[in-house]
């Protein structure tokens, strides 16, 4: 049944009910925030395969569209649309598996070795830097009160970094353990994503029918147009940002390798990943990269 939003009293009543309901929900959430977090976590765990499947389908759809529009429509024009879709999905997941294999075989071992080496060498780096700083402060004849402040702040910083480095390896182990324990959810997510990609036109049609059944034709058209524009803008931005970050990571690796910087793979990976974050990503990636290189080779 469609709601006649043009009626003034219906609109006021609907908006009043929505505001009242949202106010009650907000109050209940704030008053029982811990219980709310637990319930949300339980629901996320239940629907995790579906959530993973939707995310995979949305991301992999860019690769699928590339294969369908650029390759399959030119190479096998006479084939049926269903056949092209199946071939495109197979090529899409083969591409994803290839990229995953390249990451696990070439990048991940170097990342782990760099992290382990950095964690093991951090105490010696700090001892060397502390010695240099003590020599510098003695040459500059800094007053005792300022010297004591600098020493206390430096010791706090050293303690923070050492605690972070000590907890880093167990955190990586826990992250790996959680990923391994979620393998079944990931497998289910892959199945869901394949099902969504095969019949993505049908799911789009069902979504349109649902929107038209709830809203008036005018409002439904606005919602659908807004969703199309949002998908177009966000999708192109995301795909472009991932490609841009990949290029930045490769360029960083090449430049650091040429100038013989330490921990090239680790720094390049940090720069490439954080570059995906809009605006502040390059600065976020530069800070840990700066300190990693500073500890090893200040010059």
Image: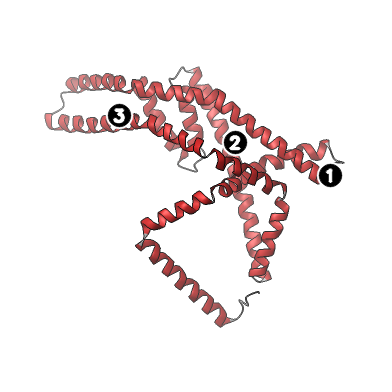
Element type where label 1 sits in the image: loop
Element type where label 2 sits in the image: helix
Q: Is residue 132 left or right of residue 273?
A: left
Kindly indicate the quadrant of the structure image that contains residue 241. top right
Identify which residue is drawn at 69% across, 55% down: 203
Q: Is residue 42 left or right of residue 98?
A: left
Alpha-carbon span between mark 3 and mark 1: 61 Å
Q: Is residue 299 left or right of residue 9?
A: left
> Which x, y percent locates residue 136?
22, 21
Q: Above or below — where is 195 with respect to 157?
A: below
User: From the image, which quarter does the N terminus lie in?
Assistant: bottom right
Element type where label 3 sits in the image: helix
Q: Is residue 109 left or right of residue 229?
A: left
User: From the image, which quarter does the C terminus lie in?
Assistant: top left
Alpha-carbon span between mark 2 and mark 3: 35 Å
Alpha-carbon span between mark 2 and mark 1: 31 Å
Kindly indicate the quadrant of the structure image that contains residue 152. top left
Q: Which residue is mark 3?
A: 162
> Which x, y percent locates residue 218?
67, 70
Q: Which residue is mark 2?
A: 243
The answer to which of 7 and 90 lies nearer the viewer is 90
Q: Which residue is mark 1?
A: 80
Mark earlier in primary sequence (2, 1)? 1
Does the rendering let one see residue 298?
no
Mark earlier in primary sequence (2, 3)? 3
The crowd level at tag 2 (other Cα within 10 Å; few <14, some 14-19, many 20+) is some
Q: Above or below — where is 211 with respect to 69?
A: below
> Which x, y percent locates residue 20?
45, 73
The answer to which of 187 and 233 lies nearer the viewer is 187
């Amino acid at each position: 049944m469609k709601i006649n939003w043009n009626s003034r009293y219906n609109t006021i009543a609907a908006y009043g009910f929505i505001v009242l309901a949202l106010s009650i929900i907000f109050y209940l959430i704030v008053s029982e925030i811990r219980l709310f977090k637990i319930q949300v976590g339980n629901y996320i765990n239940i629907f995790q395969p579906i959530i993973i499947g939707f995310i995979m389908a949305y991301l992999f759809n860019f690769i699928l569209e590339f294969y369908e529009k650029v390759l399959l429509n030119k190479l096998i024009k006479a084939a049926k649309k269903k056949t092209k879709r199946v071939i495109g999905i197979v090529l899409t997941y083969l591409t994803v598996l290839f990229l995953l294999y390249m990451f696990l075989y070439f990048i991940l071992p170097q990342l782990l070795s760099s992290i382990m080496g950095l964690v093991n060498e951090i105490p010696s780096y700090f001892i060397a830097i502390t010695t240099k700083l003590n020599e510098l402060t003695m040459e500059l004849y800094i007053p005792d009160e300022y010297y004591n402040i600098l020493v206390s702040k430096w010791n706090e910083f050293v303690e923070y970094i050492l605690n972070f480095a000590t907890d880093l390896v167990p955190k990586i182990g826990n992250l790996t353990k959680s990923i391994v324990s979620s393998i079944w959810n990931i497998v289910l997510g892959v199945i869901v994503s394949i099902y969504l990609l095969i019949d993505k036109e049908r799911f789009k049609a069902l979504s349109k029918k649902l929107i038209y059944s709830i809203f008036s034709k005018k409002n439904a058209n606005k919602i659908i147009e807004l969703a199309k524009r949002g998908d177009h803008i966000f999708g192109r931005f995301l795909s472009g940002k991932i490609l841009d970050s990949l290029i930045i990571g490769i360029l960083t690796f090449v430049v650091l390798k040429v100038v013989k910087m330490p921990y090239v793979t680790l720094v390049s990976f940090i720069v490439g990943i954080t570059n995906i974050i809009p605006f502040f990503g390059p600065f976020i990636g530069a800070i840990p990269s700066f300190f990693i290189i500073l500890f090893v080779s200040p010059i």
